[in-house]
């Protein structure tokens, strides 16, 4: 069998859940998934474990692993915490980052711009996630970086879903530019203010999240 990395299987399962191909409450059978992806059970088992950690699956002892979805209120609460963690990370990064780290961040930002220009939402998301990981690392606080990454991973499918909203990728890119400039200038408050705007889901963004969430639930046969 060809070994497909567990991370790619997890990404595929996340996408299938969000798009409604896999129903909420459906059992994720290791043997069926191994056959579907043409791999052994080991990477499937690893992918299911990661999916459980992200909150899109639930493992029940002696019964198996089942698709689940967080409630809308859970999502909002997680985005609120994510915004605070990201703001803390960018504050510390603005104070502590080296010139080399800032230059590397600028290179990642330009890679995001290329994906935007190519209208490649998937690539933009992956590069955007890399850019945020760099900011976590630039904070110089390993515990903060680990916690921020853990929650970022949990919100992965929903952050990706948001990028599908018309104009959101361009808006995200503009915010990246301002954050990068603030970091270069050492403007801690501006970097934090724009990062909060970048992550928080208020106003129209909240409506977009509700719309995307309701669409996902409708696809999965929920009202």
Image (cartoon, rainbow, N blue to C red):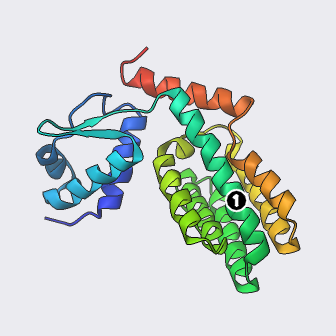
Quarter of the image with the C terminus is top left
Q: Which residue is mark 1?
A: 88
Residue 207 locus on image (x, y percent)? 66, 26
Residue 119 locus on image (x, y percent)? 62, 52
Numbered-mark total: 1
Residue at the spot 61% in from the left edge and 60% down from the top edge: 128
User: In the figure, is residue 153 to the left or right of 168?
Assistant: left
Quarter of the image with the N terminus is bottom left
Q: Nearer the viewer, residue 37 or 183?
A: 183
User: In the figure, is residue 215 to the left or right of 104?
Assistant: left
For residue 164, what is the image quadrant? top right
Tell me, yes or no, if residue 130 can be seen here: yes
Task: Give the structural element (helix, strand or loop) at label 1.
Answer: helix
Residue at the spot 66% in from the left edge and 64% down from the top edge: 114
- Above or below for 23 versus 189: above
Q: Residue furthest top?
A: 223
Tell me, yes or no, if residue 174 can be seen here: no
User: In the figure, is residue 169 to the left or right of 29?
Assistant: right
Residue 116 locus on image (x, y percent)? 66, 56
Residue at the spot 69% in from the left edge and 80% down from the top edge: 101
Q: Nearer the viewer, residue 140 or 26?
A: 140
Disc 1: CA contacts within 10 A as few (<14), some (14-19) or many (>=20): many
For residue 168, what is the image quadrant? top right
Residue at the spot 17% in from the left edge and 56% down from the top edge: 38
């Amino acid at each position: 069998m060809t070994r497909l990395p567990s991370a790619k299987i997890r990404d595929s399962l996340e996408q299938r859940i969000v798009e409604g191909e896999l129903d909420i409450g459906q059992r994720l059978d290791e043997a069926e998934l191994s056959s579907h992806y043409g791999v052994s059970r080991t990477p499937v088992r690893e992918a299911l474990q990661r999916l459980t950690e992200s909150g899109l699956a639930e493992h029940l002892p002696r019964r198996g692993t089942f698709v689940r979805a967080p409630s809308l209120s859970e999502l909002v609460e997680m985005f609120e915490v994510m915004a605070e963690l990201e703001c803390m990370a960018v504050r510390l990064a603005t104070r502590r980052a080296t010139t080399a780290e800032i230059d590397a961040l600028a290179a990642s930002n330009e890679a995001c711009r290329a994906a935007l220009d190519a209208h490649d939402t998937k690539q933009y998301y992956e590069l955007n996630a890399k850019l945020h990981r760099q900011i976590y690392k630039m904070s110089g606080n390993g515990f903060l970086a680990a916690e921020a990454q853990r929650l970022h991973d949990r919100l992965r499918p929903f952050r990706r879903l948001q990028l599908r909203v018309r104009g959101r990728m361009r808006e995200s890119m503009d915010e990246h530019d301002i954050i990068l400039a603030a970091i270069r200038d050492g403007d801690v408050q501006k970097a934090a203010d724009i990062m909060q705007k970048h992550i928080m889901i208020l106003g129209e963004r909240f409506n977009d999240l509700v719309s995307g969430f309701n669409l996902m639930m409708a696809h999965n046969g929920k009202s």
